[in-house]
Amino acid sequence: MQGDVIHDIFVIGGGINGCGIARDAAGRGYSVVLAEMKDFASGTSSASTKLIHGGLRYLEHYEFRLVREALMEREVLWAMAPHVIWPMRFVLPFQKGGLRPAWLIRLGLFLYDYIGGRKLLPATRTLDLAKDPAGRPLKALFRKAFEYSDGWVDDARLVVLNARDAADRGADIRTATAVVNARRENGHWVVETENAETGARETMQARMLVNAAGPWVDRVLSSAVGRNDVHNVRLVQGSHIVVRKKFSDPRAYFFQNPDGRIMFAIPYQEEFTLIGTTDRDYHGDPRDVRIADEEIDYLCASASEYFAEPVVRDDIVWTYSGVRPLFDDGANKAQEATRDYVLKVEGADGQAPLLNIFGGKLTTYRRLAEAALDKIGEAIGVKGARWTAHSRLPGGDFNVDGFEAEVKTLSARFPFLQPAHARRLVRLYGTRASALLGDARTTEDMGRHFGSDLYEAEVRWLMQEEWARHAEDVLWRRTKRGLHISAAEAAVLEDYMQGR
C-alpha cells in the first residue's frame, strides 16, 4: 500500500469528465489521484463531432436547462482555451416541405440566440444561397439558409490540458493504469491498480471514489466495486468520416436528414471536411467500436443529398467511431436519449462515499465538474470555492481575439518556422509553444524529423509534459499528424518513443 497516505479523492477515468473533476478538485486544495486505463481521451472524448455547442436539436426534446447551460458555457470555455476552442458559424440550409418548417427553425434559433447570455458570438441571420458563397457547394434547390454561431474544439487536447493543469495543481495523474479492485475498508476506499504495460500492481487509499469511466462506468461498478446487475447507461454509437476538402468556406454546415437525425459537415485540419455523426444503440465492448459499412453508406448518402458533388467512399481518408455513455432514460430512439448528465452518490452510515458520473458532453464538462465538487463537498467536507469559470487552461493565457497576434509573436521569435507550422503549434500549445521549441534557432535544432511538420522537439514535449507513450497518442490525439504521416513514418516514431 502507498504508505499510509489517504488521499481525498480517487478518480477513475481520463476522459473529459474525469480530468475536469480532477482539475477542479486539485484547484480547491483536495488531494487527488486519477487513473486512466489507457490514454487520455482514448474513448468517447476524442470521438466527438468536436463542437462546443448548445445543442440546437435538443430544444425539440424540451431539454431547455441543458441547452441554456451549454449556451452559457460556449464563451466561458472559449475564454479558458482560445487556442483549442474558437467560434464557428454554421449554415443550416432550408428546403420547403422539409422536416422542420421555417417558423420552427426561426423560433429555435431565436431561443438559441437569447437564452444563453451570448455576448461575443454573432447573432443568427438569414442567407440567400443564390448570392452567398455558402450556396456554392450545395445543390441548386437550396435557395435559403439560416446562419448561426457555435464553437469548435480540439476535443482530445481539451482533455489533456485539463489533466496537465490538474497535475500542475498537485494531482497525481496516471495513464496506462487500470483499477482492478476497489473496496470499502475502515471508512475509506482501498483501490488496487495495475499498470497496463508492466503489470505492476499498487494499492492506494482515498476518502472518496469518483467513477467517471464513461462507457465503462457500469463495468467499474460490477468488476471493480463488485456490484451486480447494474444498468445505468445507454451506449450510443456515433461515427464520423473525414474526406478530402469539399468546400473552401470557413463556415460549417448543419444538415437535417429525413429520418429526423441531423448531421454536420465541418472544415477540418485545413485540408479536409469532417462529416458526422450517426446515432445508433451499441451493445458490444466499447473498446471494439468501429464504423460500420451501413454507417459509411448513410453518411455518404446523407451528405450527397445536400452537396452538388456527391460524397463517395473514395473521398474518405479517415474514419473514427465512439460510444457515448448516455444516462438511460428509457427513450425509444438513440437520438432521443438525454444528453444531460446525472450524478449519483452512494454511501451512507459511515460508508466511504462513491460518486458515479453518468452522461454529459464536452460543452458542459466544466459545469458537471462544479456539480460533482458540490457533491464531493457534501460527502467529505468543502475545500475552496468555485474557481474555474474565470480560469485559463495551459497555453490559453491570451485574449479570445489574440490568436493571430500569438502566431506573429511565435513566428518572430522562431523565424525558421513555416507559417503553417507556426499556426499549428499555437493552435495546439498556445503560449507554451515557445517553451516547446526552447532554444531552437534552425529547423535542425528541432531534432529528428518524423514526417509532415512533426519533429523530435514536439514529440519529447508530448512525452514529458503530456503523458504521450505511443505513436498513436501523438498522431491521433495530441496532434492530428496521423492524417499526414505514412504508416512507415508512424512505425519509426513508435520505435523512437519506445527507445528501440
Image (cartoon, helix red, strand yellow):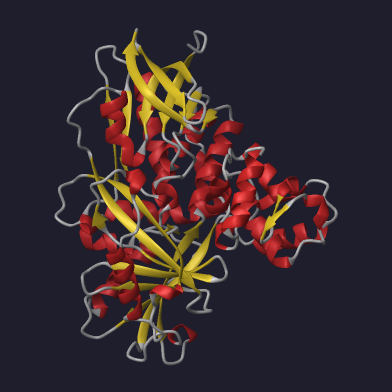
**In which quadrant will I find the C terminus?**
top right
Q: Is residue 320 visible?
A: yes
Residue displayed at 50% across by 51% down = 77
- Left or right of 427? Residue 316 is left
Across and down, in percent, residue 57 comes to: 29, 64
Residue 101, located in which quarter of the rendered image? bottom left
Across and down, in percent, residue 304 comes to: 34, 80
Residue displayed at 40% across by 19% down = 191
Residue displayed at 46% across by 19% down = 201
Residue 233, located in which quarter of the rendered image? top left
Residue closer to the observer: 428 or 344: 428
Q: Is residue 30 above or below residue 326?
A: above
Q: Is residue 122 visible?
A: no
- Left or right of 422? Residue 104 is left
Across and down, in percent, residue 42 comes to: 45, 45
Q: Is residue 170 above or below residue 290?
A: above
- Residue at the right extreme of this rendering: 441
Across and down, in percent, residue 4 comes to: 49, 8
Residue displayed at 26% across by 22% down = 226
Q: Is residue 100 above or below residue 320?
A: below
Number of numbered discs overlaid on the protein picture: 0
